Each structure stands twice: as C-alpha cells, then as structure tokens.
Amino acid sequence: MKKTLLLLLALLSLQVQAVEKRLRPFVLAGTSQASMEETLQSTRNKLKAGNFEIVGEYAPYEGAEIIAITRDDLKATAAKTDFGGFGAVLKVALTQTDNGIQVSYNNPDWVTHIYRLDGSLADISRDLGNLLGHEKTFGSRKGLKAKKLRKYRYMMMMPRFDDNIRLAKYKKYQQAVDAVEKGLAEGLGNTKKIYRVDLPGKDETVFGVAILAGKSNDAFIMEKIDTAELKHTAHLPYEILVSGRKIYMLHGKFRIAQSFPDLGMGTFIRISSAPGDIEKHLKAVARANKKKK
C-alpha cells in the first residue's frame, strides 16, 4: 500500500512538472566551428534527411543565414485552426559569432502555443533535436507557461495573437493570393519574397517577407534589439497570411515581442516606429491589385 501511494505521488509530481514546464522561443542546436557555407550545406542535408521541405532561404545581413522549413505534419496541424498558417513554417538560423556559428531554430513547443495551434508539434521538436541538436532553449530568462503563451501580450493593453491587422480584402481567395504574389514580385514596399506555403484543405497561404528598407528594415531592427549572447536570428522573416478573401499580418507589437519577450521598455521605445512601418511595407504588398483612386 505504501509503495502504491509513493508511486502515485511520483506520477502526480511528474504531471505537475509537465504542466508547469516553462517554454522559450528558440532552441540552440549547437555551435559549429566549420565555415558558414559548410555549416549551411550540412544543415540543409540534415533537414532533408528528416523529410523537412526547405521553402526558402534568406541572408538578412552579413554573418546570418536563415532556412525556412515546413513538413506535411506541420502544415496539417497548422491547418486545423484559424490563422494557423502563421505557425506553418519554422526557421533555422545560422549566426556567425566570435565563438563560432550558432545554429538555432524556432522552438516548436513555443510555436504551438503562441499561435494557438490545435495539436502537438512534439514529433517536429523531437526530429529537429535529433537532426540538428538540442543544447538548450533560450530567448526568455524565466520562460513562459503554455497557458500564458496562448494569451500572450508584451504588457497590458498591448495586442495579442488574435489582434491581427487586416491589410486588404478581395472578392476571391485566389485574387488575394495573386495580389501578394504580384506585390512581392514587384518589390512593393521594399520587400522580397522568401517563401510561400499553401495549407492543405483550406484557402490559406502564408508568405515569408523580407523588409529591405525603411525604419523597420530587418538589419536595422535586429541591430537594435538582438544584442544578447545567443542570437534571435530565427525571428525573421515576417509573415503575410492570406486567409479566405482577406490578407493579414500579425500586429508588429505582438510579432516582435513574442520573439523578444524580455525586451526592456527602453529598447522597445527605440524601435517604437517599427510596428507601424512594418504594416506600411506589408500593406503595399497586399494592396498590389487595388485600383488607385
């Protein structure tokens, strides 16, 4: 009887620990001493071996390379929820530092909850850890619990995940997709297309978009806020989501904060113009097929 009671208490303790697990936005896979090109090619090969699809690559500034990836099970999970397309693509980042090349990626457990996905990305998390490594999670000193993440905002009165911004509306889904494709092809808003992923079984498409100029250009913003020892390079690029006939973006104050939850208010103020500027750039893309008055 005593042994049974102890076993039950031990199981209860494990359950409580699981519930109380604190999450962080990024995973440090490890540090490579090889060249950037060698590390990049090796990372590509490992991802392909795990059936990950490389949907785009991006070098936002010197010493940084980003590989955007997805997989059928990731897309299927993302497709289950409203605006799940924001979580349909993960980024693997290679960042040159004085100690070697940091290889990191978006934490799938964080993505699951910050984008309110209905399902688990545990298989994705396990496979990325096996393929690339899983030295530790980082990006938030204390971390956040899953319940907190699902209603996350930087501070009171700031936007949450579902406080997204509608950039444009068209009569049909395909017209909305075509508008984004046209806007990116023309580089409207000083942007560049990094990837496109269509979600299965629904009219939803997510685009990865680089911002190349203005007060919110990728290099400028990261220089201001990505100052910690472990780099948040996998924060980039931003997303445009076509869902049905409408085109959306995540509010900049949410999108930046969820990658930098420990960002001090003083630093946030230094980039106070960025959220509005990001919207301006992405709106130019989304409204590519709108007639000018």
Image (cartoon, rainbow, N blue to C red):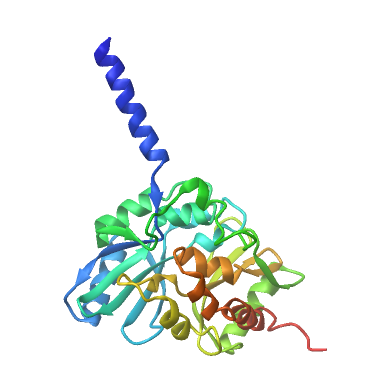
Please, which residue is most extreme toward the left here?
Answer: 33
Seen from the viewer's position, the closer of residues 152 and 213 is 152
| Residue 130 position by quadrant | bottom left
The residue at 62%/84% (across/down) is 183
x and y, in percent, of residue 129 in the image: 28, 56
Residue 77 in view in this figure? no
Give left or right: position of 192 versus 44.
right
Q: Quadrant of the N terminus?
A: top left
The mark total stands at 0
Seen from the viewer's position, the closer of residues 32 and 49 is 32
Give left or right: position of 187 versus 261.
right
Please, which residue is most extreme toward the front here?
Answer: 266
x and y, in percent, of residue 274 in the image: 57, 80
Q: Quadrant of the C terminus?
A: bottom right
Give left or right: position of 259 versus 97.
right
x and y, in percent, of residue 49 in the image: 27, 62
Seen from the viewer's position, the closer of residues 6 and 93 is 6
x and y, in percent, of residue 185 in the image: 57, 86
Residue 212 in view in this figure? yes
Please, which residue is most extreme toward the top here?
Answer: 1
Seen from the viewer's position, the closer of residues 63 and 205 is 63
The residue at 51%/49% (across/down) is 148
| Residue 141 position by quadrant | bottom left
| Residue 55 position by quadrant | bottom left
The residue at 51%/52% (across/down) is 149
